[in-house]
Image (cartoon, helix red, strand yellow):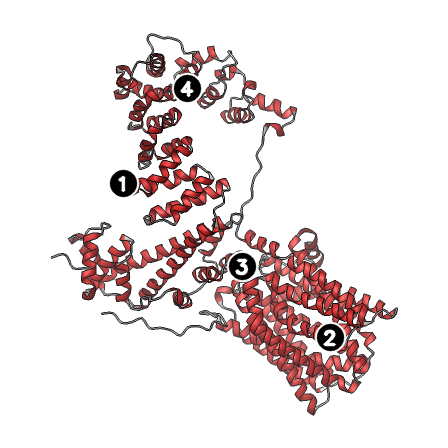
Amino acid sequence: MTEPVPRRAALSSFIDVRAGEGRPLLSATATLFGLVAAHSLLETARDALFLGQLPASRLPLVYLVVALVGVGLTDLNARFIRRFGRRNALVVTTTLLSLGTAWLHFRPVTPGLAFGLYVWSALAGSLGVVQFWLLAGEVFTSAQSKRFFPVVSAGGVLGAVVGSALAVLLLWLLPVGSLLLAAAALSLGTAFLAASSSEPEALAPRQRAPAPALGGSVGLLLHDGYVRRVALLVVSSTLALLTLDYLFKSAAAAALPKQELGPFFARYYGALNTAALVVQLLVAGRIVRRFGIAAALAVLPVCLALGAAGLVVLGGAFALLLLTKGADGALRHSVHRVGVELTYLPMDPELRDRAKPLIDSVIGRVAQALGAGGLFLLATYGLGSPTVLGALVAALSLVWLVAALAIRRPYLDLFRQSLGRGSGYAELSLSDLDLGSAQTVIEALSSPEPARALAAMNLLADAERTRLIPALILYHDQEEVLLRALEVVPDATREDWVPLARRLLEHSSERVATRAARALGRHGRLPEVAAAIGPLRAYLAVGRLGRDRSADPAADPELTAMIAGTTPACHGARLALADAIADAKDPRFSPVVERLARDADGEVAEAALGALASLGSDESIPFLIETLADPRRRAAARQALVRFGDRALEALGIALTDGRFTERVRREIPRAIGELGSERAAGLLSDALVGELPGLVRYRVLRALGRLVRRHGVRVPRERLEPELLRNLEESLRLAALALVFEESGPPPERARPSDRLLRGLIADKQRQARERAFRILQMLYRSEDLRSVYFALESSDKRVRANALELVDALILRASEELRDLLSWVVDDLSLRERVERSEARLPGRPRTLDAALGVMLGDSDDALATLAAYHVRALAVTDLDDEAAEVFSQRRWMPLDADASALFGGRSNE
């Protein structure tokens, strides 16, 4: 007996951390915690010192200075990162922030120092945050980012809470200036933390091209629509938040004494940061995972628009202003920050390196400068009342909301592009040509190059202008040109081709002579040549029998001799006979054509099957269905059935579920049904999909249905497809549970290694098949998407490629049922076998946990291959408790016989 597979404790459902991901996540979270905690201390000190030394009317001026200096630092920051690397840049910036803040602490407090401190804190803090998120975007894939950014952002929000709480505590005991020294100490500790962290090897940064100049980056706005949309989002949010910040601080300065500003800001920011932490931990991740990026970006502008509208109505009530600013504090650094950072993930890494600093720094700072200038003008002309500013915040928030909702489609398009989606092509028609081009087409008909002459003929034939093709083309010296010309030139309304075609009856190529005879015979122009042999003889015979309505073609000795003959001349005669019968369209020839369809020569059989379709006798349909089992004649039989249309469809539908037909025939029927390309054909296949069919036949039904939907645009009701989708996803998880048992059961004994290896391989193959079938169904549900590329991307060895594919899948199924979203994520996500099985535990009741139990399940499986291999493995392991079940498999399954050779191969006991 085998030992039970040990169980590992399930990972927390709150933080989805997988093997090898814990250290980079912890490092990123701790680094952002330190950055934001230091900035919270610095922010509290700078606001209190600024409003204590300067009037609130100077706030627009400091906003303007911060914006202008920030624009100048953007290009320098980008070059600095390129030169020294993202991690090193963050370490140096944080260290300089620490030293500079400590120096400011020891300077006397003056209005000039308060002004400089505001500029210093805004620039240093924003540079550090930009550098951090650039580093995080490189370390984590897009799929990891969706899982981790809410957690990392929560670390930042927790840092804000701790920083604010520390500020409150210090201000009870020390003056406001002491906060600067505490911020410097926290920044220095964060620098050491960032310097000691390391990236996982699998996600090391890629090599980049040299950074473009700032002007080249600005050009992105002109050429990249997605970058423009993100820029509009940042500009509108920056203006709205800047206006709200000015309104809040000016109102606070007017409502409170100067000595109370420090404690007020410390307590208020502490409350806001605590609310933000709660939102980040309980709400942000769920919003991003359940509703997607657009919803995450839209939450904050909706709240601000409602709050600002209330300020307009109530005349700028301070309590409502505190609530509106509270929404900003609770959501900006949680839900909104996660959403904004996710907008950069689908970008190509080089594009991201150019776009993110451009948008976050240059465009953000320019917007800040313009906003500050506007606020300065409003204050100068006495228009800075709470009512006016509230109306401005509301209007800007509505623009912001529109930009947020418009980001989803281009966001998904970038993921599609990253998966290598192909483009369409335009087709040329005769109506697209001018007179000069049309003359070129006519001249090409006489070209000695076959390709040019054929292209010209095809273009004229497609435009139904074959009378423009001169009969003299039948003098062409290339066989392929003559064959095509004999198809398109002969016409009952013209006579010029007839003598030239009769000349070709003596052509050295039997194919050309046969085609000429067929063209002449079709139009009643074949000469009565007494000594005719080969192709001519067949056409003359069919013509003779066609005129004699009392004759039986199947009993005609001349036709019988042609069919039975073995000489090369008889081969040509049989080809000509099939073509002649197809042109005659006389059902009396059906038995003759069926004999030709069984000819050992594939070319003759193919021509005969086409002739059966031309005759159009329903009595031939069962014969054509049986012929699908023959690989050499299958394609021709399928095309013949298509020509019968709905008459064949009914017979095919019956045969598909009729157990009297062999499985070899039944598994070819779905494609024949799909080739008919009708709504009725789709309905028949979708009905069969939910019926009781052998596994391989069901798979062929699925493939045929997918091909039909793709080529003919037929819609299949979701309620027909979704149950099969869920069934395949559950099957993949069931197989994963079996694979987990083998993975954790340890190496088998020597005698059982062959069967163990084959069983593991078969289970893995069946898992891939279940995933493939699921994606075939998803492709039918989302017809406009290229899910074939997504499927192959998920099979890629590149984590980043897989992550992009996962992001697109997540976005597509956003509005699907929770059951489908869960199953699909468990099947396709980057999970170990144990994680996959443990997460889907509720969908796997009674899953096997020991190898014996797993073998027992496999012995009862409907798949003969899996059951038979499991039986051999039972014998090889000498699992006596399963001997009876294994013996039953050997007696009833026919996948592989139990004989001495097979038993020796798999290491088991023989029947003896």
10 Å crowding of disc 3: few (<14), some (14-19), many (20+):
some
Q: Which residue is mark 1?
A: 660
Q: Position of residue 173 (x, y in %)?
A: 69, 92
Which labelled disc corresponds to residue 559? none
**Numbered disc in front, either 4 or 3:** 3
Name the residue tied to disc 3.
814
Residue lying at the far bottom of the rendered structure: 173
Query: Contact (CB < 8 A) between labels 4 and 2?
Result: no
Dot 1 amino acid type: Arg
Circle 4 sits on which residue?
515
When the figure is inspected, residue 676 is found, relative to residue 231, above or below; the finding is: above
Q: Nearer the viewer, residue 155 or 90?
A: 155
The residue indicated by pointer 2 is: 320
Q: Answer few, some or many: residues within 10 Å of disc 4's Cα (few below 14, many 20 plus, some between 14 and 19).
A: many
CB atoms of marks 2 and 3 within 8 Å: no
Residue located at (58% from left, 56% from top)? 348
Residue 90 position (above or below residue 902) = below
Q: Along the horizontal axis of the image, is 79 left or right of 712?
A: right
Indicate the quadrant where residue 657 lies: top left
Which sits earlier in the primary sequence, circle 2 or circle 1? 2
Residue type, label 4: Arg
Q: Disc 4 to disc 2, how far (Cα)?
A: 90 Å
Cα distance between the residues tagged 2 and 3: 35 Å
